[in-house]
Image (cartoon, rainbow, N blue to C red):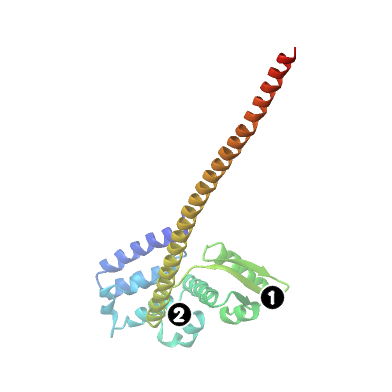
Amino acid sequence: MDIEQKQSELIDHFVKRASAASDAAALSSVLVEATSHPSLFAFSEILALPNLLQLEATENSAYLDMLRLFAHGTWNDYKSNADRLPQLIPDQILKLKQLTVLTLAETYKVLPYDQLMQELDVTNVRELEDFLINECMYAGIVRGKLDQLRRCFEVQFAAGRDLRPDQLGNMIQTLSNWLSTSENMLVSIQEKIKWADAMSEIDKKHRKDVEEKVEEVKKSIFKKLHTVSRPTSTSEGMRRSALNLVE
């Protein structure tokens, strides 16, 4: 099963569970489980559920902030706000560090080891490379090449994270620009197709004209050859008649 299909099924599962949660405590428990799941990396659908508003201004409001952190934040964001967020369990810490790698991989195509070690609180290269291989590449969220000589991770693919609200406008503009460019390209392609069709018709007409001229030339040559051959035959006949008279 590919990562997109698995994500979709997990999202549906936790959306249904969160929607059916009977109270704030049960809902908070579902959020902890969702952010701990080893194969779930998208949370915007859960975050959009209307019943999450019941966590606002309650003793469980920190769990809503925790979900926002997993949707859009990084490990450094958690450390900066740990005093007002629930304490994370080991599975959540791992997940948040994986999401941190995704955020960096979306922004940069070459990630220096020193930067990654600082962002992930990793103390040595061996630990960092094991994390990238076992927890990121094997999980299918990134693909790339570990360059030990240059001490960097070259990103080839990174799964997308949830869009932050302030990113939506830029995304819409980007898609609008892409659509406009695609439409202009389509018009250009259609014009080239029309030109190619027109040139094809011109070529066909030219070929037909050439073939007709060739036929005319053939007929003309044949006619001339026939005309030249007839006097030769007459002269030969006269010569034979003269010989007969002499005899």
Q: Quadrant of the C terminus?
A: top right
- Residue at image coords 43%, 70%: 184
Res 240 quadrant in image: top right
Tell whether 189 sits left or right of 54. right
* Picture coordinates of residue 214, whole percent (x, y): 57, 43
Q: Which residue bears the numbered disc 1?
A: 151
| Side of 195 relative to 59 (left or right) | right
Circles 2, 1 touching at the beta carbon (< 8 Å): no
Q: Which SS class for mark 1? A: loop
Q: How far apart in space, not on screen, are marks 2 and 1 (Cα)?
A: 25 Å
Up-down relation of residue 152 to residue 192 (above or below) = below
Q: Residue at x 62, y 71 (%)?
A: 154
Furthest residue toward front: 246
Label of residue 73 in the image? 2
Q: In the depicted view, which residue is nearer to us: 237 or 210?
A: 237
Question: Where's residue 48, x and y in %?
Answer: 31, 74
Q: Is residue 171 left or right of residue 218?
A: left
Label 1 packing within 10 angstroms: few (<14), some (14-19), many (20+): few
- Helix, strand or loop status at disc 2: loop
Amino acid at the residue labelled 2: Gly
Q: Amino acid at mark 1?
A: Arg
